[in-house]
Image (cartoon, rainbow, N blue to C red):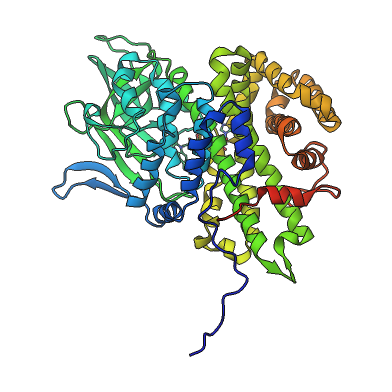
């Protein structure tokens, strides 16, 4: 029988390539931000991330969502979540490469950047397992405010061993940590938490509920609860932070009950649970009554990962779109050579390049903050600024990149629907857009050295690029005028944060980026010569060079 048809004009799968070598923006940033020494190990992870095997793990983890098992066959509570083996491969690889802990294991200059680069590459395979990786990474600095707990837990949280079975911490080769702050009545406003903690000897008993608790199979959680003073053991009332393990030192299960898993948007591989704390045992982290200060260290580090994770999502979306357009023809020409498609792809690539550069710059500030007050001030402000803007861009980029693949982009097998579903998450988590913008205002008001450090960062690029100079001066004028009216300042917070982010991205591109990308960014984002959708870059730019730079060369 002759075949009914031949398959023509379909691109080869984007597999068997090295995500690191295909991404010059990342490689350049790695060297610039002080982690050139890590290039080989980051490249190895990039090669693994582009292998057909790893791509298949990502697909399988998405196709086989986790299942909650509340009880065993005899009716005893077990509160376990069962994951597909592909999930364990993804998470095990992340842990064995130190994506959850490398800067704590070996805090050399550039360690944060090297780890962020690895996270950026590996999370492009599948985003969901990045959640426990990030939370474990972020929990360590917070836990250090409780040295006794840190002594028991840090060696396990930073070990390169992945051991998913629940066991007392002393018996574990490696452990993971999550966070439980959000309750039904409030997630942004955690001061409204109603979970209570009562002292019981050297520990506390926590009673209440948590409404959105991701990676519930982690070994421990940092949990916020209201401490209650008692006659026997007076404690300052207020929100406090606790380490709550799943398994107690005697081997019994803690009273940390998983009620149900969320049926949610976003990735399908990771689980998020509703949790009942029914007299669960916890140990206080930091001072009782100062829980927000204690957990802030964790939040700062997970916010960094929101930026890095969203930059990774942008990069993967652009890689898929440019790859498709390089191999698909319509109306007698490759899509990538059609002038209008080239404008769309270039516009997306510019956004992705700016996001990657900003993410790595912020990661560099995490490295340098301890020994450099200006970098510490920059880190505080720039993390919130970047978290707002890079995460906000993700859904738009994912939607437009998906359209570049035409109908194929709407089909699960392409991987684009996974990117699209995941795209809004990082903006919502760890401070939704408004909360994050208001946080920027708080930093501007309380830590003026943050703005000074940011302006210092802009200065050399302002001198070199008149479009940036004009926009930065206008932003400074607006800031000065708004300072007189706090309510107007709040209403305009998103506008201000977006401007600061764009100025920062422009400054990085002008100083260190590809000239064609910097020119396109300044023309469109800084001088405002563009429309609201992607693909509206003005004439006169070198779009071909921008698209060529962004297109992965598959092996
Ligand atoms: C996939 C996923 C995983 C998550 N995992 C975890 C987890 O592991 N642990 C955890 O603790 N939480 C987790 N969360 C919860 C998340 O952190 C909260 O949903 C988030 O903080 C928002 O809280 P909320 O849902 O109560 O919304 P609300 O606080 O009610 O906010 C609703 C909206 O109002 C806005 N808003 C609030 N206050 C103001 C204001 N003053 N001015 C202007 N606008 C305002 C917010 O920006 C938001 O857009 C997760 C959420 C998701 C989606």
Q: Residue at the location (60% across, 46% down)?
A: 315
Q: Residue at the location (67% across, 14% down)?
A: 448
Q: Tell me if residue 184 comes above or below residue 331 in the rendering.
A: above
Corner quadrant of residue 144: top left
Q: Which of 551 and 457 is in front in this view?
A: 551
Q: Is residue 74 left or right of residue 553?
A: left
Q: Looking at the rendering, in which quadrant would you find the C terminus?
A: bottom right
Q: Tell me if residue 328 comes above or below residue 501 in the rendering.
A: below
Q: Residue at the location (84% across, 33% down)?
A: 467
Q: Where is residue 135 in the image (x, y as percent from the top left)?
A: 42, 32
Can the viewer see residue 84?
no
Q: Position of residue 214 (x, y in %)?
A: 40, 39
Q: Is residue 110 left or right of residue 233?
A: right
Q: Where is residue 140 in the image (x, y as percent from the top left)?
A: 40, 24
Q: Residue at the location (55% across, 36% down)?
A: 308
Q: Is residue 545 left or right of residue 182?
A: right
Q: Tell me if residue 256 comes above or below residue 370 in the rendering.
A: below
Q: In this view, does 428 lie to the left or right of 479?
A: left
């Amino acid at each position: 029988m002759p075949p009914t048809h031949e398959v023509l004009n379909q691109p080869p799968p984007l597999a068997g390539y090295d995500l690191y070598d295909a991404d010059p923006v990342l490689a350049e940033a790695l060297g610039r931000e002080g982690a050139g020494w890590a290039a080989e190990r980051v490249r190895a992870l990039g090669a693994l991330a582009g292998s057909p095997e790893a791509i298949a793990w990502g697909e399988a983890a998405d196709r086989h969502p986790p299942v909650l098992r509340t009880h065993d066959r005899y009716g005893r509570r077990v509160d376990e979540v069962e994951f597909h083996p592909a999930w364990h491969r993804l998470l095990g690889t992340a842990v064995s490469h130190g994506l959850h802990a490398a800067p704590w294991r070996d805090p050399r200059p550039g360690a944060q950047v090297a780890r962020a680069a690895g996270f950026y590459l590996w999370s492009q395979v599948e985003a969901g397992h990045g959640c426990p990786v990030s939370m474990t990474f972020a929990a360590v600095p917070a836990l250090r405010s409780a040295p006794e707990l840190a002594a028991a837990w840090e060696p396990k949280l930073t070990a390169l061993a992945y051991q998913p079975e629940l066991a007392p911490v002393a018996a574990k080769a490696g452990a993971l940590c999550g966070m439980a702050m959000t309750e039904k009545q409030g997630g942004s406003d955690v001061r409204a938490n109603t979970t209570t903690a009562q002292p019981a000897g050297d520990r506390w008993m926590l009673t209440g509920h948590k409404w959105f608790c991701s990676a519930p199979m982690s070994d421990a959680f940092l949990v916020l609860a209201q401490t209650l003073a008692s006659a026997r053991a007076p404690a300052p009332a207020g929100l406090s932070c606790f380490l709550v393990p799943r398994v107690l030192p005697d081997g019994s299960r803690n009273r940390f009950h998983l009620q149900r898993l969320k049926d949610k948007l976003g990735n399908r591989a990771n689980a998020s649970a509703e949790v009942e704390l029914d007299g669960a045992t916890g140990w206080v982290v930091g001072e009782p009554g100062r829980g927000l200060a204690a957990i802030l260290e964790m939040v700062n580090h997970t916010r960094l990962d929101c930026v890095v994770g969203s930059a990774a999502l942008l990069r993967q979306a652009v890689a898929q779109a440019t790859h498709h357009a390089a191999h698909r023809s319509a109306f007698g020409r490759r899509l990538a050579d059609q002038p209008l498609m080239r404008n769309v792809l270039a516009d997306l690539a510019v956004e992705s390049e700016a996001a990657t550069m900003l993410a790595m710059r912020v990661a560099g500030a995490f490295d340098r903050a301890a020994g450099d007050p200006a970098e510490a001030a920059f880190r505080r402000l720039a993390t919130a600024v970047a978290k707002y803007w890079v995460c906000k861009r993700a859904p738009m980029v994912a939607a437009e990149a998906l359209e570049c693949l035409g109908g194929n982009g709407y089909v699960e097998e392409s991987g684009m629907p996974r990117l699209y579903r995941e795209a809004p998450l990082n903006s919502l988590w760890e401070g939704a857009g408004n909360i994050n913008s208001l946080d920027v205002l708080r930093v501007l008001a309380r830590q003026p050295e943050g703005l000074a450090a940011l302006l210092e960062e802009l200065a050399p690029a302002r001198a070199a690029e008149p479009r940036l100079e004009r926009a930065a001066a206008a932003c400074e004028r607006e800031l000065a005028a708004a300072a007189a009216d706090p309510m107007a300042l709040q209403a305009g917070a998103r506008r201000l944060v977006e401007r600061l982010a764009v100025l920062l991205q422009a400054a990085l591109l002008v100083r260190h980026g590809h000239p064609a990308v910097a020119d396109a960014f300044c023309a469109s984002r800084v001088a405002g010569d563009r429309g609201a959708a992607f693909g509206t870059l003005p004439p006169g730019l070198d779009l071909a060079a921008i698209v060529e730079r962004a297109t992965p060369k598959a092996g």
